[in-house]
Each structure stands twice: as C-alpha cells, then as structure tokens.
Image (cartoon, grey):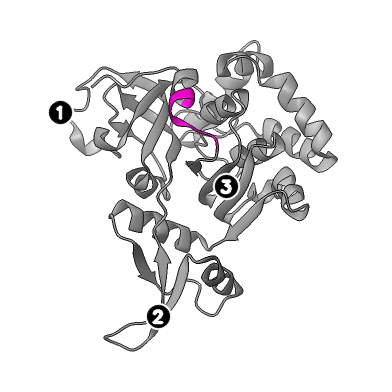
Amino acid sequence: MHKLLTATEAVARYVEPGAVVGMGGQNINRCPMALVHEVIRQEIGQLTVVGCNLSLPLDMLVACGLVARTEQGTGNLERYGTLFAWRRAVERGEVSVGDHSHLAMATRFAAGALGLPYLPTRSLLGTDLLEDLVTAGVAVEAVDPWSNRPLVLLKAMTPDVALIHANRVDVSGNVVIEGVTSHEVDMVRAARVTIVSAEEVLPAGSFADRPEQVTIPEAYVTAVVAQPFGAFPTSVYRAYDFAEPEVKEYQALGRAGDDELQAWIAANLGDSFEDHLKIRDASGAMREALVAQMGRLV
C-alpha cells in the first residue's frame, strides 16, 4: 500500500487536538523536527507528549502553547541545558508532568507493543517518582509470586500517534533506522498511528532482498513523509551531524524568555520545512558542512 503523504497532509489527517503524541528521537539525535514544525503550523493543541528524553521538539510545542501534559524520563538537551519553555510552563502550572525513569517509560512502551495491560519492573523501587506514579494510577507496587521480592507493575503506554524520523523508508512504510533506536521501535508498535519522515523515500519492495535492514516493518506505519534534513538541527547517524550553533542559539533564546522564543519561532518556521531550512541556511553551506562532519565521524 502506498503511504506517501506530505507533512501537511499527514499531520492534518492523523494528529488531533488532545492527542497523546509519542515523540521519537533522543536529545540531539534524530528528532522529528519537520513533523513537529507542521503540528505547530496547524496549531494542534492540548497535546500530551510522551517519550524518554523529550528535547527540542517538546520545548517548541510548549513555547507555542500546544502542550497540556508530558510523561517522560527527562526533558533536556543535556550539556546545552534544560528545556526552558517547558520548565517555565511547568512552574506556572500550565503543563502537568508525569516523571518516570527512562527504563520505566521504555517498559510502558514495551507493554503497549506486546498488547499487555502492564509489565513488571524493579525500576523506581525506593524512589519518590514511584509514589507519584502510584498516585497517578500508572504504577502499582506488587510482589513477585515466585521470589516474594518487591516489584512494580507499570501500565502500558499506547500513544494515539507516534512521530519519528528515519534514515530511509519505502512507500509501503518499511523503516530503516541506523544507530540508536532507544524506545522508538516499541513506541511505534504500541501506537495507534505512526507518521515517519525520512531522509530518503524508496519504491515499494526496495528491502525485499535485504529484510534484515528493516528496523520497523510496514504493518506498524500509517504515513510516510519524504523530508531530507527532517531532523535538523539534530543529527541523523551516517547522514549529518547536529548543528551546534543552532542548538546554542535556541537555548540562549529559551533562557531569555518566552517572548524571545516565540518571536524566533514565528520568524523562522516558514510555510514548510523547506522554507525553514532556507531561512536558517540559505546557501546550504551549513548542511553541507554537517554532512561532511558526519562523514569524518563514521
């Protein structure tokens, strides 16, 4: 089945107000920036955003007032700092938060992927996080019936829609991700709908003679979007490195305040992701350098 759509079509069709959105990517690696930009353009709000390390995509959504809740392991850009718009919104009570460990979030996606209502884990035992999750109704303290040791039952996480960016995908939805996948494979299998943007979209059957390369099979993918540099300014392994000056500029604006960040988004979003890339890198020289830099790393 041909699943190729534009980002505008895919987001309009499958991302609804109030949806639980599973976010792919990790920190500064392979974030679904093109898809998130389109959510912002269409002003789809009241979202619950879930993932392991929710980073730049989440902060942009929060800065635009589109997020009501997050459930995550962390929310930061590691050495580049916290997510400032998200932190301010949480402190003001505008966004509610369900704090997890990374393993706890991965376990919840795994339960959803397996079609189970919950999975057991020993992550969170002895922590304040567990108390909050028990109160929220997503965790239950229990006892292993064989060993009598304590454990935690974590409720499955089944997003309404998952957004990920990949190296390659065919028009049928067979996805190839190179490098770290983190929680994404289980998250996609758990989600009701998945939109995949990719650096390269190939004809149907392109992986028929090399099925071992497929990270996520077509059965779990709803829509395919062709978008070179669709993770910019984050990286895509073997394709291009992350754009450190872009990340630093965004974080400086985030520190400055919401008005500065919102003004930057309004000025740089453009009418499409291609517009955004031209605004940020009119000559293409930055992208060429990022490709070359990744080439030196791998």
Between 15 and 274, the residue placed more toward the observer is 15
Disc 1 vs disc 3: which is toward the camera?
Answer: 3
Amino acid type assigned to the residue bearing label 2 in the image = Ala
Write down the quadrant of residue 189 in the picture. Answer: top left
Can you identify the residue that label 3 sits on? 54
What is the C-alpha distance between the residues marked 1 and 3? 36 Å
What is the C-alpha distance between the residues marked 2 and 1? 47 Å
In percent of width and height, residue 231 lies at 53, 30
Between 78 and 137, the residue placed more toward the observer is 137
> Residue at (47%, 58%) from the top-left corner?
105
What's the magenta region? 11-17
Mark before the other along the chain sequence, 2 or 1: 2
* Residue 232 in view (yes/no): no
Identify the element where label 2 is drawn.
strand
Can you identify the residue that label 1 sits on? 209
Mark before the other along the chain sequence, 1 or 3: 3
> Residue at (16%, 27%) from the top-left corner?
208
Can you identify the residue that label 2 sits on? 142
In percent of width and height, residue 96 lies at 65, 54
Mark before the other along the chain sequence, 2 or 3: 3
In percent of width and height, residue 268 lies at 70, 20
Outermost residue to the top = 283
